[in-house]
Amino acid sequence: MANFSPTFLDEVLARSDLVELIQRHVELKRSGSNLMGLCPFHHEKSPSFSVSPDRQLYYCFGCGKGGGAFQFLMEHDGYSFPEAVEYLADKAGLELPRDTHASHTDDLRQQEDFRLLERAASAMAAALNTPAGANALLYLQKRLLPPAIVREYGLGYAPQGYGFMDKVFGTDAATHAKLERVGLLFKGDRGYGDRFRDRLMFPIRDRRGRVAGFGGRVLGDGEPKYLNSPETPYFHKSELLYGFFEHRDTIRKRRQLVVVEGYMDVLAMAAHGLKIGLAPLGTATSEGQIGEILRLCDTPVFCFDGDRAGRQAAWRALERMLPLLKSEFSPKFLYLPEGEDPDSLLNKEGAEAFSRRLEQDALPVLESWIYGLKLLAGQGAEGRAVMAKKADAMLAAMADPYLVQVWRQEAERVSGLALQSRGRPARVEAPKPVQRAAVVLNAVEERFMAGLLQEPARLERLSSAAMNFFIDKPTIHAIYSRAFSMRVDAEAKDTDIARQLIRAFPDDQQMISRWITQAAVHDIEYRSLLLDMETNDIRRRMRGGIGLGESVLLQKRLRELQQQQQELKEQLGTTGA
């Protein structure tokens, strides 16, 4: 568990540029004092993702994600908090404090493991261009894969026999144990041996771009045809997707994603300018992988080979997708002609024809479901009964009640039978921790807090009456009061109040980021908001039951506030603002 000092964290953030981090993934354009772009966390057609260069905070007004540099690396790139701190500290040239990690040894081991995997990938890439790798290189040439793609994706070759890893890393027992830990060696009766031999090698990277493991294709008649790294602390076949790191940003920008069956299909698409392909690691697409796919793109196309195995793979993917489907997702399924795969079709037809297939021939998921049910059920009355029964079982896995209604109606129309399912049955689950209720602000309160945090000097000019603002909203009142105290107590007037508030209220950092990244609250609007806030506060107090004398005073103050609002409106009309 990390235990970084606030001073060190502030220094890391002060030397980091959130805009530079985000611009690697998002095209940002100036909008007032902020930058706007398409959100990298959800799918949208018009920009709602705002970045404040001055405050080094981001917020999406569509999905509510927000925070600073640490949060972006954790949410988007999959870093843990210590890893995010370490990454930014390294970029800034800051030495990590020695006592920040209770598990410092584990961190060093992980770094060493990834260095071993990266070094192995480099050695395999070099071996591809040696006489020993001639057959592997010839295979790639026959598959029409350009040298640039081979280099970009780090393809390599693991030579025949045993001893290649020894030549690269040495033969001492400690090194052998490390190589076994990362899946490069296995331990047999006669000692350690190379896991990959005489295979074309595909490095598989995690979300951060680190080599986590390998897939190897046999070049002869051996079995298995594809061999993956074993399960290790870094390599989990059911979680990783081939091409995810390399294609993530392109997929988000183009809002296109194609799920294919094999590594070569991904590479063939990339070679034809379609860097939007992902593939599971030689196994059926898991529910976790499908969840990652739907988070990345809400309109993915699952493209499978045009044979029986391809149709079965598509059906398994559809089954695993059902619990995750929501009405906002629109996945499709493309069934290729018999005997064809994306690689072969691209080489025959080219990228434009393949893109047309994706656009015109892909079936919406509901149509694909009905198509699959018909194939399973067969003909006649018995077939219709089988279809209805299977549809019932599958609908029970779906969580979205509206989708269940639509799918049930379609299955009943096609089968001619009434279905029983009403969606996923209720499950008895362990009690969940009590979550704090979401805080709802009205438009005036929202803009008022934005105005204060965008211009903290306004905090110093608040009247004593303003101290009761948000008294009926304890969460907001705590932030509001702390902001006032921070500004008053700050030794320097340029103290970053927003950053201090996020540190003090980590659970509320998205809300604080939202206030900072809103459209600027200019002075004339802020003055109107301040009048509205006091007016609303007085009305709240009057509803609470007060004495006659206090009521008279408050009503007098209300009239004064209304007069000031009227004067402000007249001023706006005069200036044409």
Image: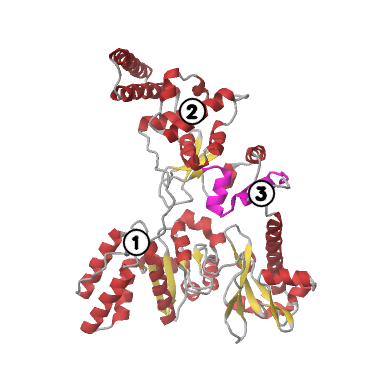
Q: Is residue 425 left or right of residue 453?
A: left
Q: Circle 3 — which element? A: helix
Measured along the vertical axis of the image, is residue 23 above or below residue 211?
above
Quote the CA–CA distance across marks 2 and 1: 42 Å
Q: Circle 1 — which element? A: loop
| Labels 2 and 3: the sequence-earlier one | 3
Image coordinates for residue 504, horizontal then vertical, percent: 55, 37
- The disc placed on residue 399 is 1
Residue 361 visible in the picture: yes
Measured along the vertical axis of the image, is residue 251 above or below residue 379?
above
Q: Circle 2 — which element? A: helix
| Labels 2 and 1: the sequence-earlier one | 1
Q: Which residues are magenta?
A: 67-96
Q: Amino acid at mark 3?
A: Glu
Instruction: Assess disc 3: are there few (<14), some (14-19) or many (≥20) residues with their C-alpha within 10 Å of its C-alpha.
Output: some
Q: Quadrant of the C terminus?
A: top left
Q: Amino acid at mark 1?
A: Ala
Measured along the vertical axis of the image, is residue 89 above or below residue 512?
below
Instruction: Assess disc 1: are there few (<14), some (14-19) or many (≥20) residues with their C-alpha within 10 Å of its C-alpha.
Output: some
The residue lying at 24 percent from left, 70 percent from top is 420
- The disc placed on residue 86 is 3
| Labels 3 and 1: the sequence-earlier one | 3
> Residue 221 sits in which quadrant?
bottom right
Measured along the vertical axis of the image, is residue 198 above or below residue 84?
below
